[in-house]
Image: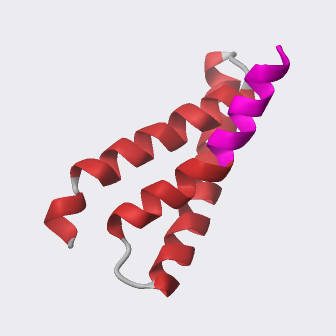
Amino acid sequence: LRWIGILLINSLLILPAAASRNIAKSTRQYHAFAIIFSLFSGVLGIIASYYFNVPTGPMIVITLGTIFFITFAIKGKIK
């Protein structure tokens, strides 16, 4: 059970940075996108966990993962 918490924490740290790295053109954009993705996924994850009656942490990570895959898919089109 402790490993699951470690994986969740690592996901919350790594996924916003990885998603913003996919689409950022400068360091300033990199930081701004990481903050925006973190805030957006946090709020959306809390709302979704309330309506779907699931734990909040994993729902935030699922939201971040979705954002990462979307930015990964459009990475070539933006840069």
Point out residue 4 in the picture as x, y percentages from the top left corner. Answer: 74, 21
Q: Is residue 4 magenta?
A: yes
Point out residue 47 in the picture as x, y percentages from the top left corner. Answer: 65, 36
Q: Is residue 43 visible?
A: no
**Residue located 63% across and 37% down the image:** 60
Quarter of the image with the N terminus is top right
Q: Is residue 75 visible?
A: yes
Q: Is residue 78 left or right of residue 31?
A: left
Q: How many marks?
A: 0
Would you place residue 27 above or below residue 23 in this image?
Answer: below
Which residues lie in the magenta part? 1-12
**Residue located 44% across and 56% down the image:** 19
| Magenta segment main secondary structure | helix
Point out residue 20 in the picture as x, y percentages from the top left corner. Answer: 45, 64
Q: Is residue 3 magenta?
A: yes
- Residue 36 quadrant: bottom right
Q: Is residue 29 left or right of residue 74?
A: right
Would you place residue 19 above or below residue 34 in this image?
Answer: above
Q: Nearer the viewer, residue 11 or 45?
A: 11
Would you place residue 36 above or below residue 28 in this image?
Answer: above
- Residue 39 quadrant: bottom right
